[in-house]
């Protein structure tokens, strides 16, 4: 009986990928984001789907959604602008998303939430 070396290597790689995926998935399930970060993510997603991007209305919308808002930073092709900054917390989570506003152009927005 001959052993097919290619099949043995293939089986070993499948096992390695399966173990790695299972480990990563268990980390995600065991440590989900904090509820207040999830609230801001939901509010930002709702705003993106239902509004044209405007810094002032976006900040008002997020401020009404949560009191944990720390900072909103906008990155344009021409530079960076801090649209809102609250009192600095000890730690924070960063949520980054791209907001399209024209054909092929977008604004990258970082929302930092108290952690």
Image (cartoon, grey):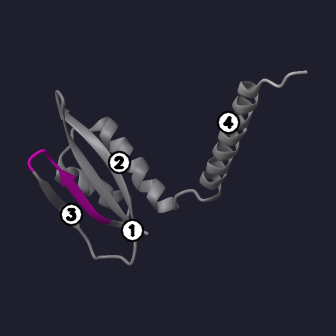
* Disc marking residue 84: 3
* Disc marking residue 92: 1
Q: Badge 2 is on which residue?
A: 44
Which element type, helix, strand or loop, lies under badge 2?
Answer: helix
Q: Badge 4 is on which residue?
A: 13
* Disc marking residue 76: none
Badge 2 or badge 4: first in the primary sequence = 4
**Distance from the alpha carbon under mark 2 to that under mark 4:** 40 Å
Q: Give whichever of 78, 62 is nearer the camera.
A: 78
Which element type, helix, strand or loop, lies under badge 3?
Answer: strand
- Asked whether the beta carbons under mark 3 and mark 2 sit within 8 Å of each other, the answer is no
Badge 4 or badge 3: first in the primary sequence = 4
Answer with the quarter of the image where residue 62 lies: bottom left
Answer with the quarter of the image where residue 11 lies: top right
**Distance from the alpha carbon under mark 4 to that under mark 1:** 38 Å
**Distance from the alpha carbon under mark 4 to that under mark 3:** 48 Å
């Amino acid at each position: 009986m001959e052993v097919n070396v290619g099949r043995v290597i293939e089986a070993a790689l499948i096992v390695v990928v399966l173990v790695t995926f299972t480990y990563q998935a268990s980390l995600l399930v065991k440590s989900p984001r904090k509820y207040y970060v999830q609230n801001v993510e939901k509010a930002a997603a709702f705003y993106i789907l239902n509004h044209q991007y405007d810094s002032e209305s976006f900040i008002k919308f997020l401020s009404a959604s949560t009191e944990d808002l720390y900072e909103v930073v906008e990155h344009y092709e021409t530079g960076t602008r801090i649209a809102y900054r609250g009192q600095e917390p000890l730690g924070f989570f960063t949520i980054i998303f791209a907001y399209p506003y024209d054909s092929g152009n977008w604004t990258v927005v970082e929302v930092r939430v108290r952690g």
